[in-house]
Image (tube, helix red, strand yellow):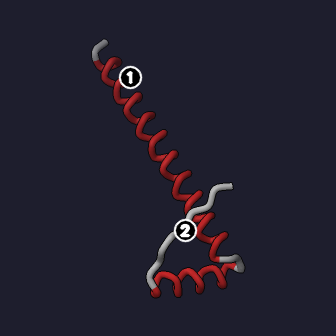
């Protein structure tokens, strides 16, 4: 499995520690889950945009009938 080192400033690390502790997970798990969530949301936004664009084209064609 590939790994990635990510740098955080002291305030960010403190907040990560606090959130991880509050959620009962390791910082590594917290950062991994947040990254996967962000990637998923990006895919959803892209799919939504494609759908909106396609529907706009359909609506345009229907208006021309």
The label shown at residue 42 is: none
Which quarter of the rendering shows the C terminus? top left
Above or below for 26 versus 61: below
The residue to which callout 1 is attached is 58
Q: CA distance from mark 2 to mark 1?
A: 46 Å
Between 65 and 48, the residue placed more toward the observer is: 48
**Where on the picture, by quarter, is residue 20?**
bottom right
- Which quadrant of the figure contains the N terminus? bottom right
Q: Is residue 34 above or below residue 21?
A: above
The foreground one among 59 and 4 is: 4
Q: Residue at x 46, y 46 (%)?
A: 45
Which residue is the extreme one toward the left? 64
Locate residue 39, reporting x and y percent. Answer: 53, 53
| Residue positioned 35% across, 29% down in the render | 56
Say which element carries label 1.
Answer: helix
Name the residue located 52 percent from the left edge and 83 percent from the top edge.
Answer: 13
Percent x, y of residue 51 = 45, 34
- Note whether 53 is above or below 8 in the view shown: above
Circle nearer the N terminus (2, 1): 2
Indicate the quadrant where residue 54 lies.
top left
- Residue 31 placement: quadrant: bottom right
Residue 5 is marked as: 2
For the image, the number of numbered tags is: 2
Label 2 or label 1, whichever lies nearer to me, is 2
Which residue occupies 37% across, 32% down? Answer: 53
Q: Residue furthest top?
A: 65
Q: Residue 30 placed where, x, y %?
A: 62, 71
């Amino acid at each position: 499995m590939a790994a990635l080192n990510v740098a955080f400033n002291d305030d960010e690390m403190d907040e990560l520690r606090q959130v991880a502790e509050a959620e009962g997970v390791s910082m590594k798990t917290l950062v991994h889950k947040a990254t996967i969530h962000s990637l998923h949301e990006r895919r959803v936004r892209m799919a939504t945009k494609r759908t909106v664009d396609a529907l706009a084209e359909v609506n345009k064609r229907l208006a021309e009938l």
